[in-house]
Amino acid sequence: MNESRVAVVVLSCGDDRALHGLAQALDDVTPMIEMIDENALLLPMRGPTRYFGGEDKVARRIVDAAAVIGIDDVSVGVGSSRLAARLAADRGGVCIVPDARHRSFLAAQPVTVLQSRAHVDADVVSLLFRLGLGTLGAVAGVDRTTLADRFGPDGEAVHVLATGGELHPVCAEAAPTQCFVESHHDEPLVDTARVAHAAGELATRMVCELSPRGLVACRVIATFTTEHDETCSRVWYHPHGFTESMLGERLRWQVEKWLDDGLTAGVAHASIDVQTTQPHRTTQLGLWGEHGEADRAAWAAVARLVSLVGDAVRVPEWHGGRDPMKQFALVPAGRVDLRDVDAARQRVTPGEVHPRDWTGDIAGIVPTVPVEPCREVDVVDAAGHRVVVTGRHLFSSQPAFIVDGVRRHGIVSCFGPWPVEERWWDTARRRRVARMQCLVDIDNRRTAWLLVSEYRSWWLVGVHG
């Protein structure tokens, strides 16, 4: 049997408390459980398979353990790599991919799984698709050196994953320590917020120790111990390495769920054991070098808030695309790298990255107030006939009124339609719409609206301030 075989367990409910409970229930199967994300965990199969007598028996034991603690919507995938096992688990139930079918199973998968299941950059995945490499098999057929020349480190990573390899080996037992940080608390911590803050500080110390060596941690063992020797130990993994905010957010989640179970004493010791590292992907600093004190103070403040309230702390993130209402999204601050210079510039100066000179762009500034969720309205002409956008991208008649529920608003002037065809090459995600800006008269007050026509229906998506 392949020594690197792994099982990925996925909870379709996405309940992090249930995932924590399942991880505890599986401690007697193997102690080296990797936490992958909010609804999935990974188990090395070398030890459990030999002890319990086969992969199917281990998978059944996992399902039974989940049922005992009240979890019914669990799926288990077994494969020869993290990616293969996760894709097998996504099929539902118990799915075991034998070694002999490992390559063919991956080859049939769409290239988009690299983004959703392996954290490959969305731009890289999109370009691979547009180059005609729509499956992992097609990517694997390209020479590794060619991909590395075109995409750099991302190209090498993509080729490794597509051919069934691992970016980092799966460890069935603790590996030699590459970095170790710990904290002792003479006055044990009993408050969840204080423990989470201490965990965040420990993550910061780890990053500070690795940074001068040009390394980031990809796999760590985080352990918290109380005065009465109650212990919670978890293995955390990220293929591209943890920032202090990313790891701090995961440690906060770990201690919150553990402390909520009820302990007999406060936390007296905490440690992070770095098992796997990789070179840090450096970024070009500005003309005058380092970040300023104000930047560092802001990062510390955000990290403190994240340790207290978690995902409620959000920052804007540039997603791009031609839809002005979706170019930015609010994402949890603990899951992004706030020190990324390019991403930070996009958050505060979107005009530098927003393409203005293309035919599908709307006139003037984008709406200042998005309508969430979008509201369906009717656009009619002076005779009361419904206005649609023809195949030649023209109005069927001149828009005169907007019917919003029981109210009817006169259109003072309108601009458009501006047609947009997105992802025409993707049969599952292609989208064809037309936009219209209009000045409407609402109770003798003029307001600018942005409307979108899709599938011969009109939707109000934004209001200009």
Image: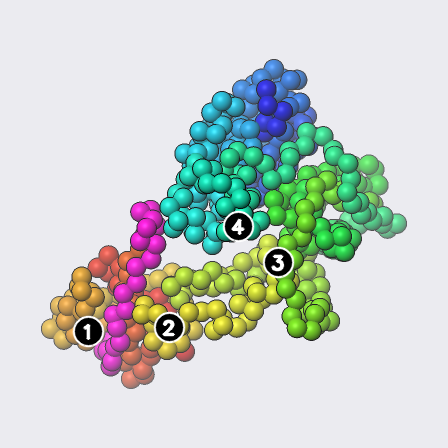
What is the CA distance from the residue labelled 1 to the residue labelled 4? 53 Å
Between 250 and 426, the residue placed more toward the observer is 426
Distance, label 1 to label 2, CA atoms, is 27 Å
The residue wearing badge 2 is 357
For the view shown, which residue lies furthest in the top direction? 53
Of 464 and 168, which appears nearest the observer? 168
For label 2, the SS is loop
Label 3 Cα crowd, 10 Å radius (few <14 / some 14-19 / many 20+)? some
Check disc 4 and report the residue beneath it: 149
In the drawing, does residue 45 fall left or right of residue 178? left
Among the two numbered marks 1 and 2 on one chain, the one whose residue lies closer to the N terminus? 2
Between circles 1 and 3, the one closer to the viewer is 3
- The extreme bottom residue here reads 444
Residue type at the position of mark 2: Asp
Mark 3 to mark 4: distance in Å? 26 Å
Q: Does the magenta stretch include residue 32?
A: no
In the visual, does 405 lie left or right of 71?
Answer: left
**What distance separates the C-alpha of mark 4 from that of mark 2?**
30 Å
The residue indicated by pointer 1 is 399
Q: Which is closer to the viewer, label 1 or label 2?
A: 2
Quadrant showing the N terminus: top right
Q: Which of marks 1 and 4 is in front?
A: 4
Quarter occupied by residue 404: bottom left
- Spatial separation of the CA atoms under disc 1 and disc 3: 46 Å
Q: Earlier along the polypeptide chain: callout 2 or callout 3?
A: 3
Amino acid found under the numbered disc labelled 3: Asp
Name the residue tied to disc 3.
337
Identity of the amino acid at label 1? Pro
Q: Indicate whether 336 appears above or below 181.
A: below
